[in-house]
Image (cartoon, rainbow, N blue to C red):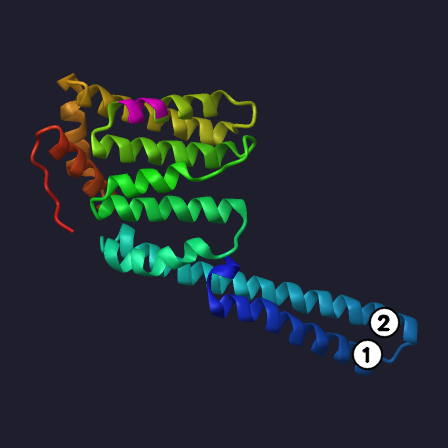
Amino acid sequence: MIRFFRASRMTAVWGSAVGAFAGAAAAWVFYPGDGGTKAVLALVAAALAVNVCLYIAKIIAVRRYQEILLLLYEKLDPEAFLAQALPLLDRKAGTADRVTHAVHVANGYLAKGEPDAAIALLKRQQVPEQAAALRGLVASNLGTACLQKGDRAGAAAALEELKQVIRSRHCKEKFREKARRIIAYQQICLDVLNGKRGGLKELEQDYENTKSPFHKLSVGRFLEKVGRSKKLAV
């Protein structure tokens, strides 16, 4: 995530370089020992300075990223969110940061009422088999996008993918428990989409009780799709 923002990148690169040099120089100049000991101490000081700068860079990146996410998940302003989030898709990042960010962008498309764009983005994500939590994250959000679109086959396929993830030996129990709840919820939605109205009351109660503006919007959109007016304007 450090690579997402100029301030965090500059802190990581130049801050680390300057900090390492300053730390090493201070250790060499002010430590009253022999040359070998000074060299070791200088290396330790340089390494410590680099780690401190990387930690600061990470804090800068996380805070900036949280500000962007709040535009979507709290303020429900998908256009403002996408304006800042879309350029970050092209930044170099590790697999976890890259895929997680793509999921957030897909949610931005959903909030904007563009499930096709969300589905296309999620389907492009390439996740290693051993990264079970990431695979599950993509599958669960793909299921949500398909449900909002009214794509029964797509939602069923995403649900099956999520079930396969929790059966994987790479899946940890903490995520498995969370995924089971998602599966149960999305199965209710899929049943409703297929004409079984037994779960409608539960979905309407969820709409009324949820504290999450984004989730309320998502459930409201789905209820509209199945003929229950729960419109929440963005």
Q: Classify residue 226 as left or right of residue 35.
A: left
The earlier-in-sequence mark between 2 and 1 is 1
User: Looking at numbered disc 1 in the image, what kind of residue is underneath it?
Assistant: Trp
Q: Secondary structure at mark 2?
A: helix
Q: Classify residue 126 as left or right of residue 25.
A: left
What is the magenta segment's predominant secondary structure? Answer: helix
**Spot occupied by residue 45 in the image (x, y as percentages of width and height):** 74, 70
Q: Secondary structure at mark 1?
A: helix
Q: In the figure, residue 39 lies in which quadrant?
A: bottom right
Q: In the figure, residue 222 lies in which quadrant?
A: top left
Q: Residue furthest bottom?
A: 29
**Spot occupied by residue 159 in the image (x, y as percentages of width and height):** 35, 24
| Mark 2 closeness class: few <14, some 14–19, many ≥20 residues within 10 Å | some
Q: Is residue 220 above or below residue 180?
A: below
Q: Which mark is residue 39?
A: 2
Residue at 67%, 69% (x, y): give it: 49
Question: Quick check: marks 2 and 1 in contact, CB under 8 Å?
Answer: yes
Residue at 40%, 30% (x, y): give it: 178
Residue 212 visible in the snapshot: no
Q: Is residue 60 above or below residue 200?
A: below
The foreground one among 80 and 15 is 80
Residue at 56%, 31% (x, y): give it: 130
Q: Is residue 23 above or below residue 226?
A: below
Residue 15 visible in the snapshot: yes
User: Mark 1 sits on what residue?
Assistant: 28
| The residue stretch that appears in magenta | 153-157
User: Looking at numbered disc 2 in the image, what kind of residue is underneath it?
Assistant: Ala
Q: Classify residue 227 as left or right of residue 149.
A: left
The foreground one among 86 and 13 is 86
